[in-house]
Structures are given as C-alpha cells and as structure tokens.
Amino acid sequence: MIHIDVERSPLLFVEFRGALTNADADAYLELIGTRISMRERFGLVLHAVDVPVPNLATIKRISDWMRTHNDEVMRCHACLALQLESAALRGVLKFFNTIVAPACPQAVFSDAVAAEAWVRAQLAREGLMVPPASQRRPASG
C-alpha cells in the first residue's frame, strides 16, 4: 500500500506499507513524473514500513524509469530522505545506486523527524519555503 502526501509541497511524503505492488510502483513513478513535468524543485521523504525486498521485475522497472528520466529527475529532485527500517531494503538501495547513481543528495534515517528535518534543511538551502510541520495531515490507511 502506498500513501502520498503533497500538501506541503515542495516537501513531499511517500509511505510504502507492506509488499510493493505494481500499482504502488506506478503511483510512485507517476508522482515523480508529475513533479518533473511541473519543472519545480522538490524534496521527498520516503518511508518504508514492513516492506519486503521487491521482486526483481519491479526493481528493474523502477531503475529503468529512473535511468530514462535521469536528467529531468536531476533538474527537479532536490533531495531524498529514506526512512528504511529494513537492512534488506538498505541493501536494495545500494544496488539501485550502483545501477543508477542517485540523481540528488540522499540520506538514510531511522527516525521520521530527522528525515523531515534534513529535507527541510536541503530545501531551505535552495531558498524553497515549506509549510510548517503542524499542517501535515496524518497518513491514512
């Protein structure tokens, strides 16, 4: 299951919960595609909760999409904070980063507050304003 929160753009939140489905991958890639088509800088906090390692077809699909759109992603994606609870997912991240170098600064966190603070700081360095944390809507589901 995926939950996407764009209410505090340019700070975006994506939460994956449970097994990553094709529909989840589609929704994530659609979010990134929409944001790059807007040609506006954004930062992303991605939180993976109880997510097993995705199947190789899904990994390949996402990495192929990112490789194809790398220039656009580099232009618009200011930073990525990954809150990964699983050591296996951290291994998948390393694998992704060997196939396609990260298109933006990224950092891995175990704490949601630290992940959000890091993205806020990255966006602030670029002069991008983010609504206060108190305006964040709770995740549904």
Image: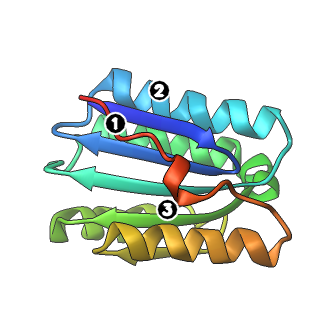
Residue 38 at what x, y percent from top left? Answer: 83, 34
Mark 1 Cα shell of 10 Å, populated few (<14), some (14-19), many (≥20):
some
117 horizontally vs 55: left or right: right
- Report how far apart the C-alphas of labels 3 and 1 lie in the structure: 14 Å
Residue at 49% across, 62% down: 99
How many numbered circles does the render carry?
Answer: 3
Quarter of the image for residue 9 reads: top right
Mark 3 or mark 2: which comes first in sequence? Answer: 2
Residue at 48% across, 58% down: 45
Mark 3 Cα shell of 10 Å, populated few (<14), some (14-19), many (≥20):
few
Badge 2 marks a residue whose secondary structure is helix
Q: Which residue is mark 1?
A: 58
Q: Which of labels 3 and 1 is toward the front?
A: 1
Residue 33 at what x, y percent from top left? Answer: 67, 33
Q: Which residue is mark 3?
A: 99
Residue 27 bears which disc, if any?
2
